[in-house]
Image (cartoon, coloured by chain):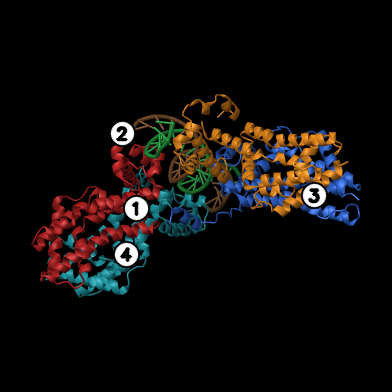
Chain colours: A orange, B blue, C red, D cyan, E brown, F green
Amino acid sequence: MTKTAEAKRKSGPRNRRVAGMDPDKRRQILDGAHAVFNAQGFDAASMSEIAAAAGVSKGTLYVYFADKEHLFVALIEREREAQKIGVFETLNEDTNLAHALAHFGEALMRLLAGDFAVSAHRIVIGVAERMPDLGREFYERGPQQGAHRLADFLAAKVEQGLLAIDDTYLAAVQFLDLSQSTMLRPRLFNAKREPPSEDEIRRVVASAVEMFLARYGT
Amino acid sequence: MTKTAEAKRKSGPRNRRVAGMDPDKRRQILDGAHAVFNAQGFDAASMSEIAAAAGVSKGTLYVYFADKEHLFVALIEREREAQKIGVFETLNEDTNLAHALAHFGEALMRLLAGDFAVSAHRIVIGVAERMPDLGREFYERGPQQGAHRLADFLAAKVEQGLLAIDDTYLAAVQFLDLSQSTMLRPRLFNAKREPPSEDEIRRVVASAVEMFLARYGT
Amino acid sequence: MTKTAEAKRKSGPRNRRVAGMDPDKRRQILDGAHAVFNAQGFDAASMSEIAAAAGVSKGTLYVYFADKEHLFVALIEREREAQKIGVFETLNEDTNLAHALAHFGEALMRLLAGDFAVSAHRIVIGVAERMPDLGREFYERGPQQGAHRLADFLAAKVEQGLLAIDDTYLAAVQFLDLSQSTMLRPRLFNAKREPPSEDEIRRVVASAVEMFLARYGT
Amino acid sequence: MTKTAEAKRKSGPRNRRVAGMDPDKRRQILDGAHAVFNAQGFDAASMSEIAAAAGVSKGTLYVYFADKEHLFVALIEREREAQKIGVFETLNEDTNLAHALAHFGEALMRLLAGDFAVSAHRIVIGVAERMPDLGREFYERGPQQGAHRLADFLAAKVEQGLLAIDDTYLAAVQFLDLSQSTMLRPRLFNAKREPPSEDEIRRVVASAVEMFLARYGT
DNA sequence: GATGAATGAGCCTTCATTCAT
DNA sequence: CATGAATGAAGGCTCATTCAT
């Protein structure tokens, strides 16, 4: 167990080598893995359960994925891809800056406070100590990249004279943090079992926009 | 099935070993548990490792704690107690509101971004799915209570006419979230291995205070 | 491994837990369990020993049986089935009542005083306190049912005018108890290591028949 | 641990050697052991439970008894002594042979079908395989000796011309077996939780006497 | 002598992984 | 290729026994 996740992953494209890899079956396995990992966490999830949930044999799991960790990493990667779709588009759907930020913040919160994303975050955070590469990659390609994209948007608005921001990356993260205030943390700790209501999302994001513009608006 | 376990349980007081508990040994065990749990997470940590790290026998673990989960919960409780000490006092150390908020935010960040707190958060979040009570209690007695205490402080300032806030709890959480922007999340995902520098903390908290007062100051 | 695909398919969907159970391996495990349980008793028998005695891995035990208790119960059930075969048939093999009783009593004693049955009795009695259901079921399906079958036989003879019995169940048990006098008890306590000789069985059962007919004969 | 129970017992009067052995405390320990062993059986009983039940520390147990097995053997010996008291006296209390046998059989059954004796039998039978000496000694000093004493009584009656018996030992065991028919076996297997009623005892023993005299009476 | 905290061997059970079919 | 029976290495936990106080 001295090999890190990274080293293993780099050792070869193991799950691309075999000719007969059926993409449908791969998806099927990941679906089962998604259900079991989210419900149980990484350690408590058993390969047997995943095989059963996926409707394949345990042996087949190992045809498509080298081991439990590789299966998990592949799943996390798929989830990340699935989530980033379409949220940032809302930024440019509205010419009014306040409205654009509000719509974006609301869409993002709907996503991040949902069961799906919360489970994924919990799991990745939970294993981040033992699988630092997974944690880092998840963070960089997820939250960090999102912040950068928002920062780019803000920079454009600065350029247009609509905002006065010194550090656009910090400002982006500030907006993101404000947009989830009181909503995400209790979800992460499982202190709130239900996603926030639409009303709550609107209220919190509205307050975030107001605060953001009070500070950075021109 | 009337199994042995039942008969055994019937026989004796399981969590009433209060008699000869040596506080030093208890602390010693918790120290070992702290090291192993933080390094491995809840599931990956083994009682054998913990026993070795604590310098006691495996059996002794079970003299002091009923099982792995109780040991873990006791550890988390100790960490929480250890952390809440002295942070909120900084709020009243300065008559100048901006300075007070800044000092408080900085002290809090020094704590929350430290290895200690980050590990604790990671691990609790990681098991929150399977141990919802632990997650909820940790959240309520930790982050939520902290927010309430800050909200009370803000309410007092509102009363003094120094701030204009409608929802003081939301405002408190907003300030807390702003104070950690860009610093806590990468730590949680293990994307940043070192705690933020004093300079970074000062810079981010200063920006948080500025934003907060831009919105709620009178 | 001698098992063929055909052999596997023959086994049928007979088991509630796992589909593909190899009857040969199941028998193999039960044989190992028989040896170890009989030699050590329920508690002192370890699953490791049983696995070794059966020539399978410890894990395999749990593929075939949910836990130690289930394995033990399955073993006891098999022993019971194995024993009840063919003893009662001797009752109707002889038209002469005295001969029929004698042959039956001798056949039964050969069985009950054998190592096999004695071990089974010892172990069931030993766990009867903690596993009352097992003890009761063993008694009801074994000794009690045997007594009922003999009672039915006696009732038929009463009807034929060959016997005069008020309580046929009591009479049946009396005959069974007389047939084992001096032979079974020392075996149960392990005071006699060898099964009784054929001569001894004949002598004791003859005395039992004589006594029985002296009381109930017409 | 290669020494057998016998070897250990013979190795020396270990629990008589120490000057300060308090007989009261010894009795106290045996009382606790009685309660726990009878309720749980030999293996499931723990020394901690016994210590708690006896109101002494675990260490004290080992001052009075070398180990768990010695404690158990000492307990069984005490129980045996306690039980044999006064039952055989009933044999000579009545000049009428039928009455004498009936009173004796009833007194014996009251004893043997009681919770106390049934538990003791169960335990000894249960460990007889692993502790053959204990089983043998218990049998020889208990049931077998009882049979011999009854056989002596019967021999006297034969001499008086009141009975015609060839093998008095066999006859004695036959009477003992008849006296417990239908009553003892279900108790041993824990299929009957309550001791038999006085009526049942009288009825079964009466039938035993009748049968016995029908065969051996003159 | 009495205590009970500490020990460590050993138990039952689980599960990721392999391999013959 | 898919299968799933089989494996074996831990893991959590218990308990008879010891020993410093």
Q: In this view, does F1 lie above or below B161?
A: above
Labelled disc at residue D112: 4
Amino acid type of the residue tagged 1 in the rendering: Gly
**The residue positioned farthest toward the top in the image shown:** A11
The quarter of the displayed image where residue B214 is located:
top right
Q: From the viewer's perspective, is the residue at label 3 or at label 2 nearer? A: 3
The residue indicated by pointer 1 is D126
Going by the numbered disc 4, the residue's amino acid type is Leu
Is the N terminus of chain D in the top left, top right, bottom left or bottom right quadrant?
Answer: top left
- Report x, y in % for residue B52: 58, 37
Q: Which amino acid does label 3 sit on?
A: Ser
Q: Where is residue A190 in the image (x, y as percent from the top left)?
A: 64, 49
Direction from residue C130 to residue B61 in the image, left or right: right
Q: What residue type is labelled 2?
A: Met
Chain to which mark 1 belongs: D
Identify residue for label 2: C1
Q: Nearer the viewer's eye, disc 3 or disc 4?
A: 3
SS assignment at label 1: helix
Q: Distance between the residues labelled 4 and 1?
A: 17 Å
Name the front one of labels 1 and 2: 2
Q: How far is mark 4 from mark 2, CA to CA? A: 52 Å
Mark 3 — residue? Answer: A207
* Residue C207 position in % (x across, y down): 14, 61
